[in-house]
Amino acid sequence: MGDIWGRALLVVLGCLLVQMGLAYGYVFPALAGDIIAEMGWTRAEFSFARLPQLAAMAAASPFVGLLSVRYGARRIILFAIALLGTVFLLFPKVDGLYQYYALMMITGLALTGVGDITVAHLVSQWVSRSRGLALGLVYAGSNIGGVLLVPAVVALAEETDWRQSLFAMGVGAFVVLLPASLWLVREKDDSRTGTPEADPTETQRPHRRLESDSDLGLRTALRTRSFWILFFSLFTFFFYFLALLEHMVLYFTDQGVERSQAVRLYATAIGLGVWSKILLGLVADRIHEKHSVLVDYGVLALSSLLLLVSPDSRLLYVFVGSFGFAYAARDVVYPLIVSYCFGARYMAPIYGALMLTLVLGASGPLFAAAVHDHFGSYAIAFRTFALLNCTALLGLFLLRDERSLFASPG
């Protein structure tokens, strides 16, 4: 466990519980049938709600990063959980499409506050040597939450209705998530003042350290090549990941796979995220941060190349395994590589600025759908994904520690 012990262990546990709040975003597809049937909406009208939600998440990310540094990530998390609970208490009152869109947009703001940026900022304060493992454990919370929460919500909806199940989730945010954050999540005050005392075990890993005065701020980071390499690679990730998330089951059924098996393959890809985050987190603590991101994007590029081959049953499983591993493990390696390039002190606002790529990446599902509607297959879309992923992988070889080029933070 390295330096994950004492108060740091409690903070990691608290952040894991906070990340389980991201599973609140997973329940809407599971309740889609019930909501559409009652409200009389089309599938397109219902699905369109994802766009304002993702746009809100992307727009809020830079501000969440900046506010985490200025006021502390714990305050942002507490506010976001309270907002999340309030929104879900209001969902049962929805009687129109635009009310639903508005609440989904607010949900996006709340999910950003309990998401990767605030949690990575806190974990990076407390953990240095085992930061990869800590992030892997914490980020697995969203997958664990999805596995536990979605079946429970669906079961409750079958006993009552979708409105009561969403109301119960709102209550759960105040009863479970908020107290856990109050009791377990803490800022590390001494991490903000100067350079911490040297840890003798850190001599084996000189490239990983806690906050220091040499760390680069967002304004300076924007002038570096590493920032724009990371920006492009994160865009290609979202462009590919969101498209596959939306169209994976449809693609499998197009290939003659039974719908039940296609859904199982989809669920397997999502479930692999728990193990891939922890596994790559362990590996990332033993190799260079740059190597860990190259491993992840290498597997991601492999998964996109597999889509270009005429699939059989074995290749489908290889694709599911590689995609499921890479998409989830990306959560772990990205905070690490951002900290490597720019330092840990201003990682939150820099990561928040990079998350603006979510708006651009949200066009991935629409691009894949348009290609299929026009040509009758996903072939051109899949070739585009493979080209972008391979280009991003090559660009990541050019990442570097940008702090050596600047005398002080920007």
Image: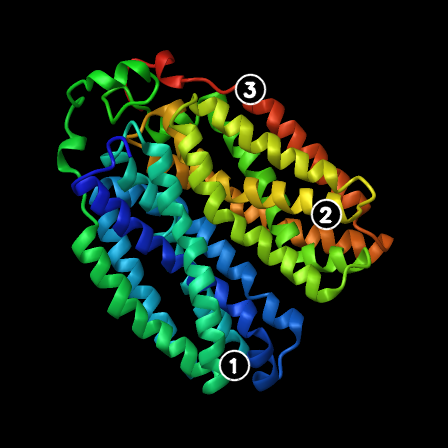
Q: Is mark 1 on a helix, strand or loop?
A: loop
Q: Which of marks 2 and 3 is nearer the N terminus?
A: 2
Asked where in the image residue 183 lies, by quadrant, the reply is bottom left
Tell me where residue 408 appears, x and y as whole percent.
Answer: 27, 18
According to the picture, the residue beneath numbered tag 1 turns out to be: 96
The quarter in which the C terminus is drawn is top left
Residue at left offset 55%, top offset 79%: 35
20 to 205, vertically: above or below:
below
Q: Is mark 3 on a helix, strand or loop?
A: loop
Mark 2: few/some/many CA within 10 Å (<14, 14-19, 20+): some
The quarter in which the N terminus is drawn is top left
Task: Tell me which amino acid carries mark 3.
Answer: Phe
Tell me where residue 146 appears, x and y as whole percent.
Answer: 46, 60
Q: Which of marks 2 and 3 is in front?
A: 2
According to the picture, the residue beneath numbered tag 3 turns out to be: 397
Mark 1: few/some/many CA within 10 Å (<14, 14-19, 20+): few
According to the picture, the residue beneath numbered tag 2 turns out to be: 316
Residue most extreme to the front: 314
Q: Is residue 306 left or right of residue 18?
A: right
156 to 276, vertically: above or below:
below
Asked where in the image residue 83 lies, by quadrant, the reply is bottom left
Q: Is mark 2 on a helix, strand or loop?
A: helix
Q: Which of 294 and 366 is in front in this view?
A: 294
Kindly indicate whether the residue at mark 3 contacts the one at mark 2 (C-beta within 8 angstroms): no
Tell me where residue 367 appears, x and y as whole percent.
Answer: 71, 50
Tell me where residue 347 appears, x and y as whole percent.
Answer: 34, 33
Task: Tell me which amino acid carries mark 1.
Answer: Gly
Q: Is residue 304 left or right of residue 153?
A: right
